[in-house]
Image: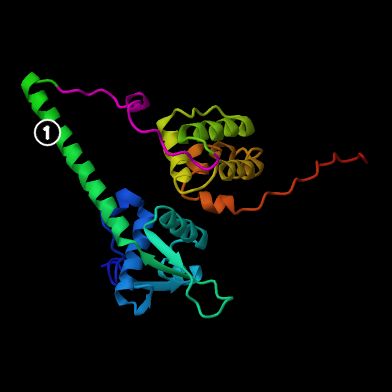
Amino acid sequence: MSNLLLDERPIMVLPKLACEIGLNEAIILQQIHYWLQKSKNIEAGHKWIYNTYNAWQKQFPFWSIPTIRRTITSLEKKEVIVTGNFNKAGFDKTKWYRIDYQKLESMSRRCDQNDQTMRSIWTDGADQNDQTNTIDYTETTTETTNNSQPPTPLKGGLSLADATKEIISYLNQQAGTSYRASSKATQRFVHARLKENYTVDDCKKVIDIKVANWKDDPKMRKYLRPQTLFSNKFEGYLNEPMPSKQPPKRAKGYLF
């Protein structure tokens, strides 16, 4: 049996929680909950734990420190965790954490209500289909969401759709490509990075770096595409240095 299969304590996460707040957030929240059960640090009537980002990475060696920092910041913005500083030394900036279980419970109730609504819609729809002996295979498009709530704007006030258009337009301009921002495949990769709190400028920076690296390379030019640039290697690309411009090659026999 492979030594990668459950020879050590696995990280547990509920799919329902991951759907509600995101997979990375659910994993870290579950780990905070685990340590809170063992904590003896009581401040302001609550149990707390404390950890540095380096210490968190020892628990999550498959993540970089920037990923852990972004995930914890996301949990703070969702108000699921509360952070504080109860360190005795004034220079010690190590964060303390606790979970707002009331907030988490309200999210759970809202999720349950959504499940009940979807089950009700499914049941009603099934009954109607039984009566008419018809099945609706209409493709779901963005046009069907006109009556839903508007999407949450990203940093800078852009919507997800507008940010995607700006990024793909920039890619086409810099790389000489003709990708469509309306493509579902393209959207899937770009949206995944934007939902991880990367910015439009981050995406443009990756485009600039990889265009400088690959555009003049016949073997690599084909990888100037959304599924490569905005894949799970995005963070690595973002942290690459911008290649320095090489001076033009001089023809032999000429001095200039």
Residue at 23%, 42% in the rendered image: 114
Q: Secondary structure at mark 1?
A: helix
* Residue 155, magenta (yes or no): yes
Reply above or below: 175 against 249: above
| Residue nearest the viewer, comparing 151 with 241 | 151
Region rendered in magenta:
135-156
Residue at 43%, 73% in the rendered image: 50
Q: Position of residue 65 (x, y in %)?
A: 51, 63
| Residue nearest the viewer, comparing 108 with 242 | 108
Residue at 41%, 68% in the rendered image: 97
Question: Residue 250 vs residue 47: left or right?
Answer: right
Reply above or below: 186 against 59: above
What amino acid type is highlighted by mark number 1? Thr
Q: Position of residue 159 (x, y in %)?
A: 48, 35
* Residue 11, magenta (yes or no): no
Reply above or below: 253 against 178: below
Question: Residue 38 vs residue 75: left or right?
Answer: left
Task: Please identify the quarter of the rendering in which residue 223 is found.
Answer: top right
Which residue is the site of mark 1? Answer: 123
Quarter occupied by the C terminus = top right
